[in-house]
Amino acid sequence: MNGFPLTVPTGYEVGDWTIERPLGAGAFGSVYAAARRTDGRDELPSRAALKFLPTGTHTPRQLRHLRDLADREVDLLRRLRSPRLIRLYETLTVDDPAHPELDGATVLVLEEAERPLQSLLSDTAAPPPSGPALLVQICEGLHQLHAAGWVHGDLKPGNVLLMKDGSVRLGDFSTASELEGTHAYATGFATPDYTRQLLWSESAT
């Protein structure tokens, strides 16, 4: 599938989950809608978004970097349970030598969103009427991150997720950085078109 770092076929099973359809992709991860196959674990929802972080077909240096990105996102989401941050339910590792492109991939089982803010903005030439309320919730999410000692690192409409009830969650924390005093080490990866606005917005909240 074009634009997806890792293609996972419909019907593929990992853990308790069955892949249904692609939702989106970034530079490092592919996200798929999935349904839970069993009802044995009550703490898990019936549906989730599975983010696959590939480990195959990379050099050792690239593999270390991908692992660092996965560990960063898992660490943040396990430590923070804030209402404006997407929820992490569990992490899985694909064990499938028959599919080397999938074997060893880290899978984040995340709260399923309705769609990203980017799709809402693309639907209309005018700002959405709910824009001010959405902006407030985005700022709440940034405040929750900053109060816990983190900066997002890649804030953009594609990483602002709209839920079915109309509320907002921030997602994709693979480039998030933990503050040390007033400073944080940031990775060299972000979305160039949003980097300047990101530096301003996160320093302003």
Image: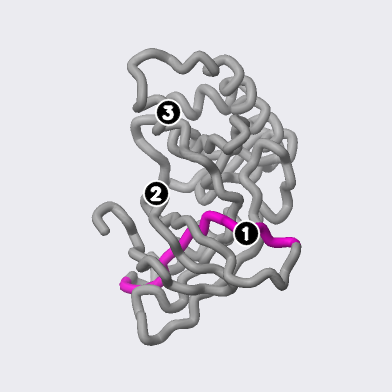
Above-or-below relation of 137 to 22: above
Q: Nearer the viewer, mark 3 or mark 1?
A: 1
Q: Which residue is mark 2?
A: 24
Kind of residue at badge 3: Leu
Q: Dot 3 lies on which element? A: helix
Q: Of the numbered discs in the image, which one, if any, rests on residue 120?
A: 3
Which is nearer the N-term, disc 1 or disc 2? 2
Kind of residue at badge 2: Gly
- Nearer to the camera, 142 or 165: 165
Residue 171, picture quadrant: top right
State the count of labels.
Answer: 3
Q: Is residue 109 visible?
A: yes
Residue 178 coordinates in the image, percent (x, y): 64, 45
For marks 2 and 3, give the CA distance.
14 Å
Q: Which residue is mark 1?
A: 46
Q: Dot 1 lies on which element? A: loop
Q: Which residue in the rendered view is the most extreme toward the bottom?
A: 98
Q: Nearer the viewer, mark 1 or mark 2?
A: 1
Residue 106: say if magenta. no
* Viewport quadrant of the N terminus: bottom left
Q: Which range is magenta?
A: 43-57
